[in-house]
Structure formats: C-alpha cells, structure tokens
Image (cartoon, grey):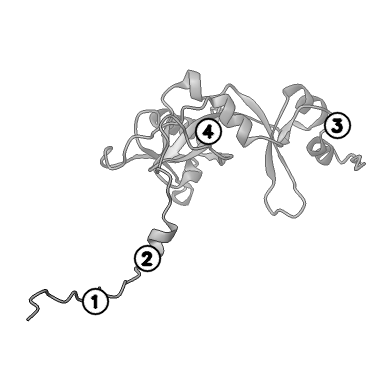
Amino acid sequence: MNDTPTPKDPPPLKIVKPGFMSKFKSKRSPSIGGVETVLSALKVHGIADARDFVRLHPSEDEYWSCEICFVSVPVKGQKKDLLHVIEDDLATQYLPSNIIKRQRLALASKPHGSFFLCVVPSQNLDNSWNKSALAACEKARTLWTQAVSRKDEGYEEYLIKFAQDQDAFPPPEWPSRTFDELLEVTFRGANIDTDTHPALLRLIGAKQDLD
C-alpha cells in the first residue's frame, strides 16, 4: 500500500484585473515642494462686486499699485468691454477725460483662495461711493470685509460689514509671485503703450492696418 499522498491539482489561476480608479490613478505626488501653481489672469473689479467677504493684501508697499490709467475697449464678438491699461501720456493726448479711469489695484482674496485684483479708488474721494469703497478696502487689510450697496435704501454709499466670526475662513495664503508678475499676466495683450496699438485705434475710430 502506497501511503504517499497524491498531489492535488493546483487551483486555477485567477486573474485579478485592476479596478478603474487603480488603472487611471495619478502616479505623481499631489504637490511638488517649492513649486507654486501658475496663476492665470485675475479678474479685476471693485470690492462690492465680489459679493462676498474679502481680504486685501496687508502690504500696501508690495501688493497695492500706484495710481494706474485704464480704459475699457469694445471687443468684437464680446458683450463686455475689455479693460486695458494705458500710458498716461497717450490717454491724455488721444482720449476724452470721461473715458479714462485712474485708480489703484490691490491683490485681494475671497474665502478659500479665490484671488482677484481689487479696484481701490484714488480720485474723487469726496464722492460717497468712492469714499466708502476706499474705507472698506482699508478695513479689508486686516478683517474679512464686505461692501454692500445701500442704493435701495436711498443712500449713495456702501455699507461696510464684517464677518461675524473672523476665523470662519482661513487666512489667505497669498501667492509668492510679485505684484508686477500678477499684473503682467492679467494685462498681457491688454496694455496700450504705443499710438498704433489696435485698442487705442479702436477707441479713436482710426483705421487699423490689418497687413
């Protein structure tokens, strides 16, 4: 009698296919140390247009501009005019004063890192709208601040409101890029620095050389 056990047949090989997420899972780390996400062009608007609580960068020297000249230029195929920066001498020489805007910009953030360039009034500060908007911008350097129009109440000014709990939102993680870099990205292709610039020619109704 043979007591040697008869070897059993091996179980059939089971092929396990990777799950869908495993197959397409990213193999790169979520972030690379020391590398910051490249910012695209930032929106430009007043503090009240944010329709939310806002913080402005606390460093006026580093992330608030000097007074800059702006014009709004009609663009074919777009309902909204495109804001351009323009050299002051060109604006004064070629354009009527009523379409030139002179104002400052400051880096600003809504809660959770929604950055934009906030218009900071720098002229006609006796105007109640400008005066209250400037006051809101100043408060927003240190506090989550909201500016709300009081026009429906019959007042020509903004109501300045503060977040009930200032720690309701984390402090902004301001980008390390310089303010010049942010401005350059935002106004790339929208800066009028010659008297032959297509945007200036559009504003004065001059024929453009399409060659």
Q: For the C terminus, give its image quadrant.
A: top right
The residue depicted at 38 percent of the width and 35 percent of the height is 172
Residues at marks 2 and 3, CA–CA distance in whole angstroms: 59 Å
Residue labelled with disc 2: 19
Q: Earlier in the sequence, mark 2 or mark 1?
A: 1
Residues at marks 4 and 2, CA–CA distance in whole angstroms: 58 Å
The residue depicted at 44 percent of the width and 49 percent of the height is 153
Q: Earlier in the sequence, mark 4 or mark 2?
A: 2
Which kind of residue does numbered mark 1 sit on? Answer: Asp
Q: Earlier in the sequence, mark 3 or mark 4?
A: 4
Residues at marks 2 and 1, CA–CA distance in whole angstroms: 29 Å
Please say if 93 is above or below 29. Answer: above
Which kind of residue does numbered mark 3 sit on? Answer: Thr
Left/right placement of residue 89 relative to residue 159 reads: right
Residue 121 occupies which quadrant of the picture?
top right
Mark 4 against mark 2, which lies toward the viewer?
Answer: 2
Regarding residue 122, the answer to whether it shows in the image is no
Classed neighbour count for the residue bearing mark 2: other residues with Cα under 10 Å, few (<14), some (14–19), many (≥20) = few
Which kind of residue does numbered mark 2 sit on? Answer: Gly
Classed neighbour count for the residue bearing mark 1: other residues with Cα under 10 Å, few (<14), some (14–19), many (≥20) = few
Residue labelled with disc 3: 196
Mark 1 against mark 4, which lies toward the viewer?
Answer: 1
Residue labelled with disc 4: 130
